[in-house]
Each structure stands twice: as structure tokens, then as C-alpha cells.
Amino acid sequence: MEERDSEAEVRSQRLEVRIRGKGMSDLTIVNALVVPMTEERQSFNGFVRVSDGVITEVRAGAPREVTKDAPMIDADGSVLMPGLVNAHTHVYQVLLRAVWEDLPLLPWLKRIYGAAQVLRPEHFYAGTLLGCIEAIRSGVTTVCEHNFLNPHPECAFETIRAIRESGLRAVFARTIMDTGEIVPDCVKENSDRAFRHIEDIIAANRQSERLSFMTGPNTPPLNTTPDLLKEIRRFADEKSIGISAHVAESRSVVEFTKEKHGKSGVVGFLDDFGIPAPNSIFAHCVHVSDDEIRVLKERGASVSHNPVSNMMLGDGVAPVVEMIRAGVNVALGTDGAASNHSQDLFETMKTASLLQKVHHQDAGVIDPYAVLRMATVNGARALGLGSACGTIEVGKRADLILVDLDAIHNQPINDLFSQLVHCAKASDVWTVIVDGEILMKDRKLTGQDEREVLSNAQRRHRNLMERLRTVSF
Amino acid sequence: MEERDSEAEVRSQRLEVRIRGKGMSDLTIVNALVVPMTEERQSFNGFVRVSDGVITEVRAGAPREVTKDAPMIDADGSVLMPGLVNAHTHVYQVLLRAVWEDLPLLPWLKRIYGAAQVLRPEHFYAGTLLGCIEAIRSGVTTVCEHNFLNPHPECAFETIRAIRESGLRAVFARTIMDTGEIVPDCVKENSDRAFRHIEDIIAANRQSERLSFMTGPNTPPLNTTPDLLKEIRRFADEKSIGISAHVAESRSVVEFTKEKHGKSGVVGFLDDFGIPAPNSIFAHCVHVSDDEIRVLKERGASVSHNPVSNMMLGDGVAPVVEMIRAGVNVALGTDGAASNHSQDLFETMKTASLLQKVHHQDAGVIDPYAVLRMATVNGARALGLGSACGTIEVGKRADLILVDLDAIHNQPINDLFSQLVHCAKASDVWTVIVDGEILMKDRKLTGQDEREVLSNAQRRHRNLMERLRTVSF
């Protein structure tokens, strides 16, 4: 039985390779400063072997046997670490960088939902591909794309097409909204239509091992009725898929929850419907009480902390330290470029560290290694990929990045983990590997003509800006 | 008379060129998106002409006449903006990146002062040159180096030698301390010795037009007696030089001020000695009252806001919005790499913007153009260089940078000023010019062998780490 499964896996991988038209052969990365991001803090000079997309050997020193002409990367002393996991974003939003500045969450959401009315599949495709390249360039190997709803179901398919073309591993969370009391412009639908769409998406992407799926109650309870939440719980259980939601992002959402549902917080409200669970990932959790943190822990739900976005929208500071201390699995996300401007998870790591230190007025309140864990292994776990990626260990998929610490701004090295969080930059990432496939080498994308992607995105962007002028927000 | 002055200026410039051994001829930068950073928000496609280090023409369109073979840079659509002004740093501290993590200000200072005891001139030279290159690479053209005191007066000379070799414009603020009640390890001296040293430094650098000088009461009143402050005021007036001080960086300093001197704040305390003045720059001002903000405004003192450092040490959030609204000139600094890890002022701009938004829980509380002004023209003004640099205007020195916005993370452009603050990165800076002299072109330093600088810094760093082991903190 095990053998059959393994055979099926190999077949499926080969199919995937064919579909993507790229080689995914064996690979050895030598002469690396390996940072495996396992429980124990460690780093060592060594090598990593990859076979058929899987890590087969992780060792200090140099490999004893090297097959002549076998694919090899000389890491040249660079840090070899797990690819970063962006646990919450809306990749297409790179087209909307800096469009709605200076707005708090609700008026901002009104515009985002308004924009959804004029966004067409070609905008989603062009924006998503551009944003995926930005992600790859900053060392991201997995994104959780919480896709905004649009009247055109094709938009989701085009978003996924772009993600697949980029080569990134991704969780696609398909948003659902069925009400819009204080954000009336959101696109509402009934759960049957939404669930059929999700089933179609899953069916169409069965062959892509790098993709998995979630349901996405958008911003409970602003735009989800209790009935919908019950349905989502049932559907997620039936399909064995996770739930991604924006939770307690601003005070206004918590206030609405109190007024409308008589509950003191969003997590508590969601708990009535069984939404916090081991396969749930809640973005933000800025305004959650100690009691709610306990609920998150007890239910095994994960949180994606998105500090740049929270700061940009003036939401507040999430109780990251408190959640980590309580044992909640806290991952890290950029959020979309409409509320961050960037898809750079290195920048997000430094910001996350700094924000907790200043918020608690305590320089020692958060440890750089904890921040690195948020951006790697915690992210993988939050997305149900804990056994697939997030650390460098034998048996895991080879999602790896090489970070050059020779740049002036990283030198000299006094504390490797701290400097990966506080000194290293997106521009230091020179190689990105997903599933053993090299997506970027020597800072050059292997599978994309960047100039062409950019030029297409610019053309679609001009069109989108014209269409946006027709929307009254 | 005017002609004589101008002749003298040309002579002096030629001398400077000879001393530095580099050419500083005429230059035209064409095909640029010019962002002059003047009062009115503007940007236009145009060109800038430079002659003998001075901006002689700034215009939209293309130049009508171009002298054949005259030096020209095709900006290729890049943003041409004033070089950034880092209004507060300790450049040598790049050797101490991430050495003392997780400490609040006072225990951290104890280590910084302790380290000063074993720092030798060669460490200051090697660290400062490395840090200057990092600054240049992030688009900085002017630094205010608040130099930490060391028993060896030669340390200051070696710091200055490194700055001069880098080609940066700089204000060298020579720190002074004469007491050390709660930070007993600081190096204390009497004012006569300190002032003689400053006079020697000024005399030795008369020929360097890119350098100016300040006195630096280090962290009043922690390590400066009232008598010293009176002396500093007198000396600064006598020499017509400015004053740079760390002011109200942490609550602990304010508390000390209350206990020791019965004053409710540091600015109020300093006002008794006439220290807040138009040629004063106060780093931090995290814990200042509304009354003190009025004092800063009325006395014409400038503030260097250093958000990354304040966050890193858990100091708190400076009332930047309140100070700007009150009319205080607020500049931007990185602070040293021992409390920032970085000398990247692009990163600092984004952090400054985000920190105010989240602190006020108001996304619209600070405007990107105001942040750009902090990092350019306000910085120049704060350092007494308002007529020399900080904007692109005819008659100002040619301190210019070219920022490539074609990188994926900057595209598409929706709001140029916001995206310069929130999207652009140090790695987008490809050309840096100071006084008309090209310090970096196509991301290559023109006057330094970076690998050699790095290798020397690493060697000195190893030695410093050994010496630090002998210090009991």
C-alpha cells in the first residue's frame, strides 16, 4: 500500500513537471551555511541533497561522493534556509500599491470591494504573476493567497494560473461573503454557488501538488452571516480543507461584533460555529482578548501576523508576544500590497521584531529566532504544510533559499539569527528553489521573462485604473 | 567682492579635488524623473546640469545643447532626487551589529561606553569606512556622525579620515561627557581638553569643504554637568558651530532629570543653558511634553527622529506628528548599527511612516511627502546645510541620487512620493553623487575597493571582539 502510494506520488510529480515544463532533477547544494530552522537553534557549514523534489540528505561538511555532472549549486558560504512562508496575502493587489493611502480599515475595504466589481480575470492574472515574482525575489517559496471575491468566477482560475506559472507553492483560500451590512459594496453570494466554485477550482487543479485550498469567510461577522459560518464549517470538514479568515483586524470590526451579535470579540463569536480549529488560519488578530488567545490555543488555530499592513492601516498592534507565550502558532504575512505596498517578508520580519519591542517598551520581549520561526516553520504549520516544508529536514519537500550575507549591510556577522531578521534584505536572496525546482538562480528568474511580465502588468494596470474611475466609492 | 569670493571658492574646490584625488568636472544628468523636494510637491521629466560641484540648471525636457564628450549620465527614467541626509548616526558601530541585543537604553549604553575603552583608532577607521559604504549604497549623501568619546583622541581623526575617503558630506559632532553618575563607565574629561581636541580637529580639516563640526554633549544630563553645558554653549557660540545631543531618548533619562535636577523634562532642563537653538540638533526626543515641543519650536532647534533605533531599544514612540504640526524641523536618522543593525535610510523612511500611523491608530496621520522631506531638506537644515543641499535647486551643491523604480517591487507606479517611501529600497539606488563627484555608478563604488574595505573591517572586527572579552560590563 505504501509502495503504491509512493508510486502514485512519483507519477503525479512527473505529470507536474510535464505540466510546468521544467526539470526537477536531483540537486546537491554544497558549501552552505545551513540554517535548518528546526526546534533546536543550529547552523552549520554543510550540504543538502535533493532528489525528485525531496530533501534526502542534510549534513555538516562536504559530501563524500559527488556524481560527476550531477546538478550542483555552490552556495559559496551563503545561508541555506527554508524558503519563507507568506501566510497571508492578496497577491494581485500589487496593481493597487499606494492607490488608497491614508484610510482606516472600513473605508479602505469599501474601496477594495468596489474595485472587485471592475477587476477582470486579466487583471488578476497579470497582478498575481507580478506579485509572485516579487515574492520569489524576497525569498518566499509559499504564499497563502486569500483571494478576493469577484463576480467573475474566472478571476480565481486566472489567479491560480499565475501562481502555478510562477512555480510557488500556494494555498488558495477562496473568499466567501453573503452579507454586507456596513460594507454594502462587497460581492455577496449564496453558499451553494461558492462551494460549487471551490469544488470546480479543486477539480481543475488536482494535478498540481504545490497547490492546496481553503475556504475563506472574508471578515466575520462584517460580511458573513451565522448561517454561512455553519455551512463553511460543514463544507470544510466534508472536504478536509482549512479555513482562512480576517479576524479582529480593527476595533471597528470588534465593535460591530458586539453591537450585532452581543459577543465581546470576533474569536469568541467564531467559536460558536467551530471556526477556530487546527486547520484554521486567522489573519491579523489585532484586537483579541486574553480569553480569546486561550481559545485560539485550545482549538489549535493559527494566526498570521501582518505587522506592516496593521501599521499602514493604523489598526493597532497585535498581541504577538502574548499569543506566542500562550502557545498559539503565530505565522507571518505581508498582506496585500494595497495595505503594505510590498511583498517582502524580510522587511516584514524586521518590522515584526521592532513593533513588539516598542509596543512593550521592552527590547528583550521577542527573540530573533522566534521571528525566523514565524516566517518559516510556523507558516508552514499554519497552512497545513507542516510535514511538507518550513524546515530543512530529510523527507521534506525541497523549498530552499540561498541568502548572500557578504553584502556590506550584513557584515560583520555577530549574531546570525538576529542579522537574518534585522540586516538581511530581499536583495540578498540569490537562489530560490521550490520542490527541488530552481525558480531563481543568481537573481535571475528561470521560468519567467520578468520584463514581459512587468510590461503586461503595466498594460493591465492602466486599463484597471481607467475602469476604477467608473466606480463611485 | 563677490567675484573674489567665487574665485576663492573655486580654488578651494580644486584643492579639495586634489586632496581627494578624484575628478569633479561638469556633468549633465538627462532623461530623469526629477523629484527636487522643494516646498511645492512636484516631479517632472527633465535634466540637471552640474558645474564644479554646483547645480547650474534644473529643467523639464531635454537639454538644447549638449557638449560633445561632456560627462553625461542617462538616468533612463530613474528618479533623480536629492541625496538622503542621515541626521544622526554612529557609523563605526557597524562593527557592533547585533552584539548587544535585547537591552534597554541604560544597560545598552553601559556596554557601548565599556566598548569605547577598548576601541582603538584602527577600529574606528575600518568600521566607519564600512558604514559609509553602506550609507552610500542606500542613497545617503550626508551623515551626521555623533562620535563616541574614546580615551584616544586619534580615534576621532581616524573616523574623519574614513569619512573623507568615502566622499560623503558629513557633520562630525564630537561627543563630550564629564560625569557618569548612572553610567560610570563613560570616558569623562574636562571641557578644556575636549575643546582643544575639537579645535585640533577643525584645524586639521580646514581644507575639506564637505565636513563641518559640532560639539556633542552626549546624553544630558546623564553624563553632562550643568557647568559643562554652560561651557559648551559658550564654546559653540565662540566657534559658530552647532550642538548635537541625545535628548529624552528613554523614560529613564527623563526620570533621572527629575530626580537629579528637579526638571520635568530634558528639553526644559537644557533650555536653562540655552542649548536648544537654531544650530542644535537633538536626536530622539521620544519623551518630550507639549510644552517642550513649544520650546523646540520657539528656539528653532531641530530633531532627528530615529524610529528603528527607538523601536529596537524599546524606548517608545517620538511625537513626530505633534512636532511637525508645531512647526519643529524634524529630520530622520538611522542611529548607529548597534541599535538599528542598518544604515539604510530608505528602510527608516518606511518605518517612520508606519510607526506614526500605528501609534496614532490613524492611517492618514502622516504624509509620504513629509517623510521624504524629513530625509532630505529637513535633514540638511537640521545640520546647518540648508543652503548647501537637501533639494535640487540651482546654486546648491550637487548631492544627488538616482533611484531605479523599474524593479518589480516598485511597479506599477500609482503614487510616486508614497512609493519612494513605502516601496523603494536601498538596492534601487544605482548612482550617488556628492558635490558633483560620482561616488557610486551602476551600483559600483568609484573610489573604494569594497572587498578590501570589507576584509579590513572583518580583520579589525575580530580583534575588537577579542578585546571586548577583556571588558567587564
Image (spheres, coloured by chain):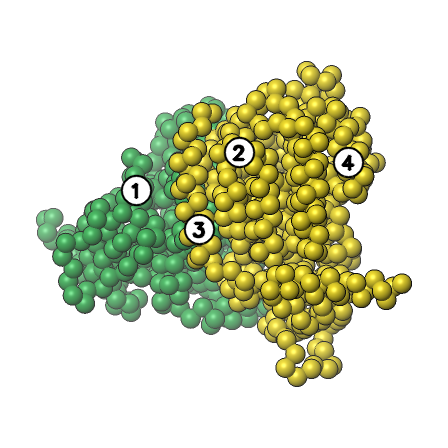
Chain colours: A green, B yellow
Q: Are marks 3 and 4 on the same chain?
A: yes
Disc 2: which residue: B116
Disc 4: which residue: B235
Residue B390 in picture, x, y percent from top left? 71, 55
> Where A81 falls versus A472 (above or below)?
above
Find out whether the residues at labels 2 and 4 contact each other: C-beta distance under 8 Å. no
Disc 1: which residue: A43
Disc 3: which residue: B456
Dot 1: element:
loop
Q: Residue at x 24, y 61 (%)?
A: A72
Q: Whole-Å distance between the Cαs marked 3 and 1? A: 25 Å
Q: Whole-Å distance between the Cαs marked 2 and 4? A: 25 Å
Dot 3: element:
helix
Where is the N terminus of chain B found, in terms of image quarters? bottom right
Q: Whole-Å distance between the Cαs marked 4 and 1? A: 53 Å
- For residue A166, side relative to residue B87 (left or right): left
Residue B305 in picture, x, y percent from top left? 66, 40
Amino acid under label 2? Ala
Residue B310 in picture, x, y percent from top left? 59, 35
- For residue B202, side relative to residue A212 (left or right): right
Residue A353 appears in the figure: yes
Q: Earlier in the sequence, mark 2 or mark 4?
A: 2
Q: Residues within 10 Å of mark 2 (few under 14, many from 20)?
A: some
Q: Residue at x 19, y 50 (%)?
A: A57
Q: Nearer the viewer, mark 4 or mark 1?
A: 4
Q: Residue furthest bottom?
A: B68
Which chain contains the residue that carries disc 2? B
Q: Whole-Å distance between the Cαs marked 3 and 4? A: 37 Å
Q: Residue furthest right?
A: B1
Q: Are marks 2 and 1 on the same chain?
A: no
Which chain contains the residue that carries disc 4? B
